[in-house]
Image (cartoon, rainbow, N blue to C red):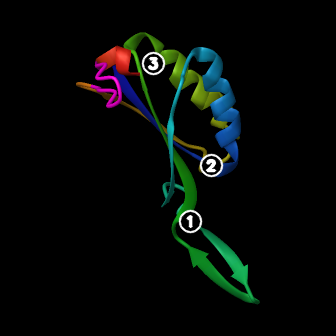
Amino acid sequence: MKLVMAVIKPFKLDEVREALTPLGVQGLTVTEVKGFGRQKGQTEIYRGAEYHVSFLPKLKIEVAVPDDMVDAVVEAIANTARTGKIGDGKVFVLDVERALRIRTGETDDSAL
């Protein structure tokens, strides 16, 4: 099993979710986060004063999938989250040692 973690622009969430559903992804976790990368933030104007925003709003999506689905999930996220502009985000893939569905006691792939 793998945990696919993606940091994307907030307005891309619905498109990403719609791309993952046909692949068989049955659930995902979304967290509102803030961060910066090569963008280094942005300058905004508020009440006539210009100020620099270092951390930009992003969404972190986490989805646990069986090993054989990883490439399709990563590709779906990358293709739908891409705008071609700086700040599109990143995708990370991590190993998952164990999973347990609390309600039924199912473990590992069955728990997904």
Residue at the image position 56 percent from the left and 16 percent from the top: 24
Whole-angstrom CA distance, mark 1 to mark 2, is: 13 Å
Q: Position of residue 91 (x, y in %)?
A: 47, 35
Viewer-nearest residue: 59 or 78: 59
Q: Which residue is mark 3?
A: 70
Q: Secondary structure at mark 1?
A: loop
Question: Dot 2 lies on which element?
Answer: loop
Q: How far is the residue under mark 2 from the one under mark 3?
A: 21 Å
Let me know if residue 105 is in the magenta part: yes
Instruction: Tell me the CA gap for discs 3 and 1.
Output: 31 Å
Residue assigned mark 2: 9
Tell me the amino acid under the disc marked 1: Gly
- In the rendered image, which quarter contains the C terminus? top left
The residue under the point 59% across, 77% down is 52
Farthest-out residue, bottom: 48
> Which image quarter is the N terminus in?
top left
Label 1: few (<14), some (14–19) or many (≥20) C-alpha neighbours in 10 Å: some
Left or right, 109 with reference to 46: left
Where is residue 44 drawn, in percent x and y? 68, 75
Query: Residue sitting at 28 percent across and 19 percent down?
Result: 107
Q: Is residue 103 above or below residue 42?
A: above
| Front of the two marks 1 and 2 | 2
> Which sits earlier in the primary sequence, circle 1 or circle 2?
2
Identify the magenta region.
Answer: 99-107
* Residue 78 found in image quarter: top right
Q: Main secondary structure of the magenta part?
A: loop
* Percent position of residue 48, x then y: 76, 89
Indicate the amino acid at tag 2: Lys
User: What secondary structure is marked by label 3?
Assistant: helix
Q: Is residue 84 visible?
A: no
Can you say whether 34 is above or below 96 in the image? Answer: below
Mark 2 neighbour class, 10 Å CA radius: few under 14, some 14 to 19, many 20 or more: some
